[in-house]
Amino acid sequence: MNLSLVSVRYAKALFKLSAEKGIMEKVYKDIILLSGHYKDNDDFRMFMQSPVVKKEKKKALLQDVYKDALNPITLGAMNLIIDNNREVIIDAVFRSFTSFYREEKNIKIATLYSAFEMDKQFQDEVKLIVAKELNCDVELSVVVKTELLGGFILKVDDKMVDASILGKLNRVRKHLVKG
């Protein structure tokens, strides 16, 4: 069976159950927490995906580390994934659940690339403009790319606004080469 389909099924089941129980926000926060730990901690990820480590040990680790932090439904979903030997799809389940949640809540992901760290006020203004323009909530991440020289690039979904100095220089270069 296609593992991406399996991960979507697990995520959809968790999403629907959390919606039915009225705890979608809490489960979303749990998924964000787990996803961050999973991405940032190679040892944790390798431990969870190891076929050598017994199921009981994996579930015991989750219980010990997250029992006070996670909703029982989130913990139960993780245990189900482990019981069914589907640990390799954990990250895909996290991504799918997050995607379902953001679609349900009309949340867009925006990435602001800048030559330097933008202050909180500018970030808030960008979020407000994007939210107003697209009629949605916005989760903004900022990535510093010094090669931009100045200005910024804003990406939302498949749209991009390039207001960087590097972008302007490239456009001038193309114009001069053409003309």
Image (spheres, rainbow, N blue to C red):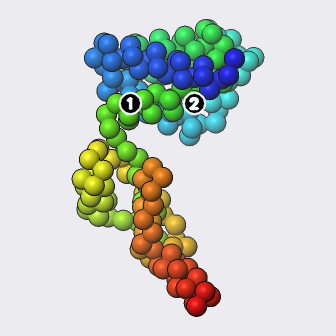
Q: How many C-alpha atoms fall within 10 Å of the one at disc 1: few (<14), some, or many (≥20)?
A: some
Residue plotted at (66% across, 23% down): 3
How would you rate the neighbour count of disc 2 (Cα within 10 Å): few for under 14, some for 14-19, many for 20 or more?
A: some
Question: At 48% across and 80% down in the image, what residue appears?
Answer: 168
Three-letter amino acid code of the residue under disc 1? Tyr
Number of the front mark, 2 or 1? 1
Q: In which quarter of the image is the C terminus?
A: bottom right
Judge from the rendering whether residue 93 lies leftward or rightward of residue 106; answer left or right: right
The CA span between labels 2 and 1 is 15 Å
Residue 19 in the image: x percent, y percent?
33, 18
Is residue 48 in view from this perspective? no
Position of residue 96 relative to residue 9, above or below, is: below
Q: Which quarter of the figure has residue 116?
A: bottom left
Q: What residue do we see at 57% from left, 29% from top? A: 92
Indicate which disc, 2 or 1, sits on the residue closer to the N terminus.
Answer: 2
Q: Which of 96 and 75 is in front in this view?
A: 96
Labelled disc at residue 101: 1
Q: In the image, 112: left or right of 130?
A: right
Q: Mark 2 points at which residue?
A: 91
Measuring 31% from the left and 12% from the top, which residue is drawn there?
Answer: 21
